[in-house]
Amino acid sequence: MSEVFDGYERHYCELSANLTRSCASAGVLIGEQKKQKLSEIQAGLDDADTLIRKMDLEARSLQPSIKATLLTKLREYKNDLGNLKTDVKRLTSTDPYQDARDELLESGPADIAMVSVADQKGRLLMSTERLNQSTDRIKEGRRTMLETEELGVSILQDLQQQRQSLLHAHSTLHDVDDNIGRSKKILTTMSRRMNRNKMILWSVTGVLVLAILIILYFKLTH
């Protein structure tokens, strides 16, 4: 579809997988270690936002048929990023599992923690699957590009051979034209000689006829 979009997508999938793992590990940290990990996660979220915007711009610049497919895929990535941001908010709040408690009502803290970890694990698997799909598309794009390049080289070779054939034909025609020119000159010379010989023949004939007439005249008069 678009090599630029595929590159952004691959980068985002890698970043999403790393962020999901970081959120899972931050849930068991405390104190300064947790703050440092959350700071790294926030920086990753900012990078992910940038990649989402770049993918959106690239998708909207393509043909309508391709754009619709990419925008649908982009909505999934936006939802995925929204879920990551929600996890980070839970981690940075005073009570990391308050939102989960509100949803599960009577579930205990241990159950909520298990749900959060399971949710993060599911997103990690989804991100990994998307990364694999993106990698496969890039490989397929490269394979298609190599096949196109090989086809282009083959076409160039054929064109080069045709060019050589045309040059050879042009040279042959030039030689034929030279031969025709020389033949024309020879025929012209022969024609002139024939005309000159005819004139000489008629002159000799005329002289002979005149001589015969003179002889007859003298014989008849004497």
Image: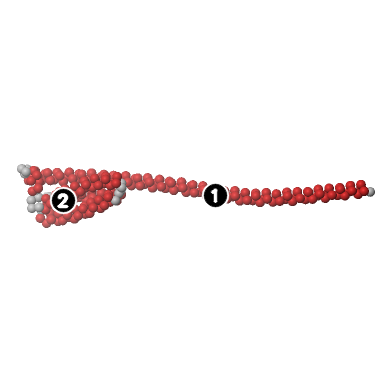
Q: Secondary structure at mark 2?
A: helix
Q: Is residue 133 left or right of residue 29?
A: right
Q: Can residue 164 be spotted in the picture?
A: yes
Residue drawn at 65 percent across, 49 percent down? 183
Q: Nearer the viewer, residue 196 or 36?
A: 196
Dot placed on the residue nearer the N-terminal end, 1 or 2: 2
Which residue sits furthest front?
221
Residue 156 versus residue 17: which sits nearer the camera? 156
For this view, does 203 lie left or right of residue 57?
Answer: right
Q: Position of residue 211 (x, y in %)?
A: 86, 49
Q: What separation in Å lies between label 1 and label 2 (alpha carbons)? A: 72 Å
Q: Mark 2 Cα within 10 Å, few/some/many (few <14, many 20+)? A: some
Mark 1 surroundings within 10 Å by alpha-carbon count, few (fewer than 14), some (14 through 19), many (20 or more): few
Residue receiving disc 1: 170
Asked whether residue 17 appears in the rendered view, the answer is no
> Which residue does the image show at 84% across and 49% down from the upper left?
210
Q: Amino acid at mark 1?
A: His
Residue 199 on image: x %, y %: 76, 50
* Residue identified by numbered label 2: 85
| The disc label shown at residue 115, or none | none
